[in-house]
Image (cartoon, rainbow, N blue to C red):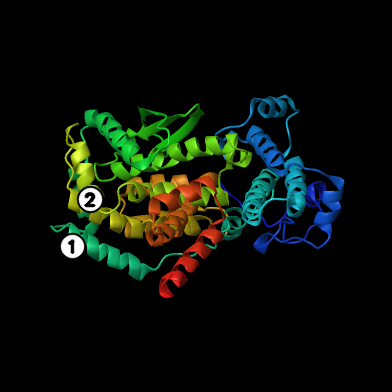
Amino acid sequence: MECAAAAFPRTLCDSVSLGRGRNFSPLCTGRYSGRRGYGARVAAELPGTDVPHAYVTACLRLRRLVPALVALVSVDRTTRLTVADEPPPTAAELVRQAGRLAAVLPDAGLVPHRARFFAGQVAALEWRARRLAGQHLPFRQEVRECLGLDVEPGEPDVYRAAHRELATLLPGPGTPRDRLAAYRRHDAMPPDRLGPAVRALSAALSDRGRRGDPAGTVEYRLVDDAPWSALQTYEGGHRSIVRINRSAAPGAGRLPRLVAHEAYPGHHLECLRAEAAVAAGRVELGVTVLGSPHTVVSEGLAECALDTAVGPGWGRWASDVLAPPGVRLDAATAERFDAVRRVLRHVRVDAALLLHGDGAPTSGRIAATEEHLRRWLLLDAGRARRVAETLARPLGRTHAVASVLGATTIRAVLDRAPDAVAEHRRLLDDPVLPEAVRSRTSTQSRNAINGW
């Protein structure tokens, strides 16, 4: 379980200190600003640093400590072999390397928005290494430092309104939880239809979601008892494996968004375009530190992938696609239920705050978290327990925040964009910090007001 100890022991602090105060990385702007003069001194010690390559190398070293912390898309063979042949790194060494890398960013000659993106990624890398070295943060501060987000609980009145909409959508006897359980049973697919349904949706989304991009290959595998609904892994060479968890029982109404999230125009397409970007010189896009600002944008784009590819009316489209493999979908109900589910997703953020907000999870916090999930997300006891177990994991808690708030942030941009598909691709090819995405939303709003 996570701990929220405030600081390093004195000896460990001495071993990793770079002479900095609370602003832990001397990055170039905003919350990532450091002490005056420090960056210039370190930059003088490290002339000519290739920041993108140094960042990729640091990510590979972090991956040697915890493979799950860094996802790979495309890294050149020489760099991979060089890092693999090094002595095993220590977390304290990675903290120092991240700090030095941050210090040279202002003089790296990068365009400002790319430098800010690096600043956020290096900050997340440093704090992942600091946690491995023994430094723990309160959950809200971890989210702020690693994801670049400020997190707050949702509004109960908003959840109550969603429950009222659900009661209208699913009339009948019993509590809203009972009616939701009945809907899930009605929406469930025969086990032998899940694979054909996934492949049918994937093929149809590939045709709609690529807009001239290579299709690549997506291999789907059905698994059981995984801690996630679906998981995409990029194998290189335009090939992904997407594992679908049968135990999560994804219904017909949920399946279109899930497949779009993992494949087209979600994570698989993201990896295809990242691989092309690496070949064109954007080597930093060949790696992703999980639980970083890049994760927020990536998860937000993936969660909005169905809306980008199909848009309003996706229920009727999905119903037509699923008919040949023998899966029935109530199109209108699926779309309305998806809208309610979108509102209630923030309950998972609440649950993470309840579980970790003031320190390590305790039996009382676990019980309160499960009760919150049952009350507002209308889960049965078993589902609530599984969600709480996922949120108890170090990456599970930040991933939940990145997914929920990323989707909210990205959807606001795409809803206002003149061409949502083009904007989706722009954010895939040139990722920015979440705060820059929010700023883009504000600019679009002002432009609309001014008639631009």
Answer yes or no: do the residues labelled 1 and 2 have beta carbons within 8 Å?
Answer: no
Residue at 30% from the left image edge and 33% from the top image edge: 203
1 or 2: mark nearer the eye: 2
Q: Position of residue 125 (x, y in %)?
A: 65, 46
Q: Residues within 10 Å of mark 1 (few under 14, many from 20)?
A: few
Q: Residue 41 versus residue 442: which sits nearer the camera?
A: 442
Mark identifier at residue 317: none
Q: Which residue is mark 1?
A: 168
Q: Which residue is mark 2?
A: 334
Residue at 50% from the left image edge and 51% from the top image edge: 297
- Residue 397 shows up from this direction: no
Q: Position of residue 26 (x, y in %)?
A: 74, 57
Question: Which sits earlier in the primary sequence, circle 1 or circle 2?
Answer: 1
Q: Quadrant of residue 92?
A: top right
Q: Position of residue 12 (x, y in %)?
A: 78, 47
Q: Residues within 10 Å of mark 2 (few under 14, many from 20)?
A: many
